[in-house]
Image (tube, grey):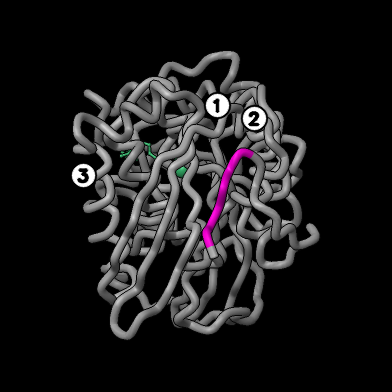
Amino acid sequence: MSKGRGKSRPKPRQHVSGFVSILGRPNAGKSTLLNALMGTKVAIVADKPQTTRTTIQGVWTTPGAQVVFVDTPGIHDADTLFNRRMMQSINEALGERDLLLYLVDSTRTPGAEDEKALDLIKDAHTPAIAVFNKVDALENNAALLPLIDRYRQWYEFDEYLPLSALKGVGLEELRAAILKRLPAGPAWFPADHVTDQPERFLAAEIIREKILASTRQEVPHSAAVLVDEWKEEGRLTRISATVHVERPGQKAIIVGARGAMLKKVGSEARLEIERLLGRKVFLALFVKVSPKWRENERFLKELDWRAMIGGDAPAVREPAGPDDNEGE
Ligand SMILES: Nc1nc2c(ncn2[C@@H]2O[C@H](COP(=O)(O)OP(=O)(O)OP(=O)(O)O)[C@@H](O)[C@H]2O)c(=O)[nH]1
Ligand SMILES: [Mg+2]
């Protein structure tokens, strides 16, 4: 707070830009924060861990700055090929960044796993801000001080900020702390560029979000969504997508009694995809049992849109693993 000077005009600064990765344990609120910082929904959110499965970019452009935020999967012990891929994408998000935001769920008591997750931050040798999220859910803020102290003992962050990504409390302070640490640089993307995710992937993610919201236990982890077909027909976009699960019991849950669950998920997803595209959408949704897809290299390649749009991987056009894919 500046004493007596009222609102002093900030000095004109050079245009700044940079890459800022958002990291933390599963369910800490990383994607909620990305959406809050962007002011628009870029990443799906759920009250289940491991919702985000790949890095997701949100490009925030203001008159004096452009920030590329990179949301990441939660840091966890990887047990399957799929989880190892998730950890790999976290590691990639740590390289050559200007700043890291390490998100802590302030409502949880920190333990050994939280301390271990910080090793990744320590090894990155990049400026990092510790963000204590979900303060709206704390009974009183006094609980925050010992928590901040604990993290301070584990790692000396550049700053420690309380925040509620959900309620938008502390966002301005966080934005200021970010901008202050970015180097002078140009905008790399046009002002209307918001994310790197193709519409096909966003649609698949929206479908998965509706499934996550309606299911529990092992079903959320076992569901993967692939868009099989995408056709523009006049003013209508016709999308056909398949929800892959690992076991017949999970398929039964997602389909529901007389197809009720699939209908609900499908219509919730369709409405949101229509809002996203600004067009009418016809969504055909199927459920398929694809045993052990999380260990299936070819299936994972199909899920990874970066590989599909010509990353380093060769374009594989054969049907993915256990999938029967789109019909001609
Ligand atoms: N009360 C409260 N809940 C929050 C806040 N931020 C996020 N949440 C909730 O925490 C849950 C997880 O949010 P996500 O944004 O999906 O968390 P994430 O860290 O991206 O999770 P993963 O992608 O699974 O690693 C959701 O139910 C959010 O609504 C917050 O500031 N306050
Ligand atoms: Mg997430």
Q: Is mark 1 within 8 Å of ligand 1?
A: no
Crowding at label 1, few (<14), some or many (≥20) Cα neighbours within 10 Å?
some
- Nearer mark to the viewer, of 2 and 1: 2
Q: As rendered, which of 28 and 193 lies closer to the eye?
A: 193
Q: As rendered, which of 312 and 227 lies closer to the eye?
A: 227
Mark positioned earlier in the residue sequence (2 or 1)? 2
Cα–Cα span, label 3 and label 2? 40 Å
Q: Residue at image x 35%, y 50%?
A: 285
Secondary element under disc 3, as helix, strand or loop, is helix
Crowding at label 2, few (<14), some or many (≥20) Cα neighbours within 10 Å?
some
Residue at the disc numbered 2: 118
Name the quarter where the N terminus is drawn. bottom left
Residue at the disc numbered 3: 264
Secondary element under disc 1, as helix, strand or loop, is helix
Q: Are marks 3 and 1 in contact (CB under 8 Å)?
A: no
Amino acid at dot 3: Lys
Q: Are marks 3 and 2 in contact (CB under 8 Å)?
A: no
Secondary element under disc 2, as helix, strand or loop, is helix
What is the quadrant of residue 87 in the picture? top right
The numbered disc on residue 151 is 1
Cα–Cα span, label 2 and label 1? 9 Å
Q: Residue at image x 76%, y 44%?
A: 125
Q: Are marks 2 and 1 in contact (CB under 8 Å)?
A: yes
Amino acid at dot 1: Tyr
The image shows residue 191, relative to residue 117, as above or below, that is below
Cα–Cα span, label 3 and label 1? 42 Å
**Stretch in magenta:** 322-327
- Nearer mark to the viewer, of 3 and 1: 3
